[in-house]
Amino acid sequence: MSERFRALVLDREDGNTRSRIEDLPLDALPEGEVLVEVVYSSLNYKDGLAITGAGKIIREFPFVPGIDLAGRVRESTVPGYRPGDLVVLTGWGVGERHWGGLAELARVRAEWLVPLPEGLSLEHAMTIGTAGFTAMLCVMALAEQGVGADAGDVLVTGASGGVGSIATALLARRGYRVVTATGRSELAEYLQGLGAAEVIDRASVLESGKAPLASQRWAGAVDTVGGAILAALLKALRYGGTATACGLAGGAELHTTVFPFILRGVKLIGIDSVYCPQERRRTVWQQLARELDAALLDQITTVVPLEKAPEIARGFLEGKIRGRVVVAIRDEH
Ligand SMILES: NC(=O)c1ccc[n+]([C@@H]2O[C@H](COP(=O)([O-])OP(=O)(O)OC[C@H]3O[C@@H](n4cnc5c(N)ncnc54)[C@H](OP(=O)(O)O)[C@@H]3O)[C@@H](O)[C@H]2O)c1
């Protein structure tokens, strides 16, 4: 009989997405050059949309979700990877169109993998996951656009979420004065612990959205929320400032005018983590391993078993998740 592996499996019944834990046969796995024993996965906002069915992320069922995975190569048909190698995978449509990381085994294309950066554990790689990878892309984009640590205040929205928490920590460690906007004032201490110099209410960012332009407040911004918050903060960027947009937790639409762009020369930089090219991907992971220490990563992580994934998935849609959620897939102890 073929070997079996444990997985979270999604099915579509009566127009609803249902999830259950199942033992699947090895030959059910999709094609790919590398078979990975998944040790940890993680949960992101997009997994929340996929597992609950609230977003049309998955189109073919049954399906194994999980956009992130970290583990050990068991088999490889390409010279670049050998059994025992430790690897990380985020993006490339894994957990969306190709079976993902919420399972003991994943078979994937070799070009999607990144070798685990030196100094990082598999668990901490998943504390970072897509959220942390995206946070670093945002922080690097600000620097590339000339927003340095001495430029002035940088705003992070959706600050207590995954991308927001790691962006806050990265910016603070690089010496920026970080102002975090949150809808959860009870998490102010948590955000200060990550390095926020100031914690403001999400509603106060919306205030600057009322007129065509607001007073110049932000040298830069990392926006994870989209919608009205992004439209409002664009109006309060300083002359020549830059905002990065990566998320839509607060809405996918953007109603704005050209005034901030043509009167203040501000820039809006779009961030995509899924198809980030391999060379930049490796650089980003090296930087993450260098700039995020173990104590900080532990501070923002909740580790859960696979059984908890559906409950956490719902939590994302309710805006209830703090920091990062790592899923322990195999017991390595
Ligand atoms: N472009 C990319 O490649 C990429 C990669 C990763 C993530 N993303 C996107 O980035 C966003 C954040 O992802 P994540 O994994 O960090 O999610 P998350 O952990 O759920 O964080 C989102 C945060 O946004 C705030 N928020 C939630 N609902 C909101 C609402 N209705 N209005 C205003 N603020 C709200 C909350 O922070 P507070 O309670 O602190 O306000 C929440 O913690 C998601 O939209 C995700 O799809 C995009």
Image (cartoon, rainbow, N blue to C red):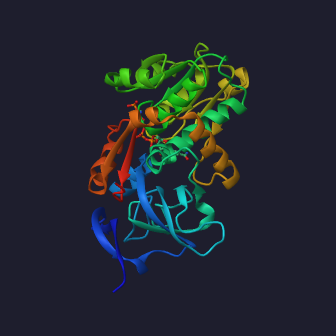
Which image quadrant shows ligand 1? top left
Between 160 and 328, the one nearer to me in the picture: 328
Residue 262 figure quarter: top right
Work out whether 319 lies above or below 275: above
Left or right of 150 on screen, residue 71: left
Residue 58 figure quarter: bottom left
Regarding residue 247, the answer to whether it shows in the image is yes
Instruction: Provide residue 200's location: percent of width, then percent of height.
Output: 43, 18
Question: So how many labels did they put on this image?
Answer: 0
Instruction: Provide residue 14's location: percent of width, then percent of height.
Output: 27, 67
Residue that protrudes farthest toward the top in the picture: 215
**Residue in the image at 71% along x and 21% along y:** 263
Residue that protrudes farthest toward the bottom in the picture: 1
Residue 119 figure quarter: top right
Residue that protrudes farthest toward the front in the picture: 333
**Residue in the image at 44% along x and 66% along y:** 59
Left or right of 44 on screen, residue 275: right
Work out whether 250 lies above or below 113: above
Q: Quadrant location of the N terminus?
A: bottom left
Regarding residue 55, the answer to whether it shows in the image is no
Between 255 and 75, the one nearer to me in the picture: 75
Q: Quadrant location of the C terminus?
A: bottom left
Instruction: Provide residue 201's location: percent of width, then percent of height.
Output: 40, 20
Between 301 and 56, the one nearer to me in the picture: 301
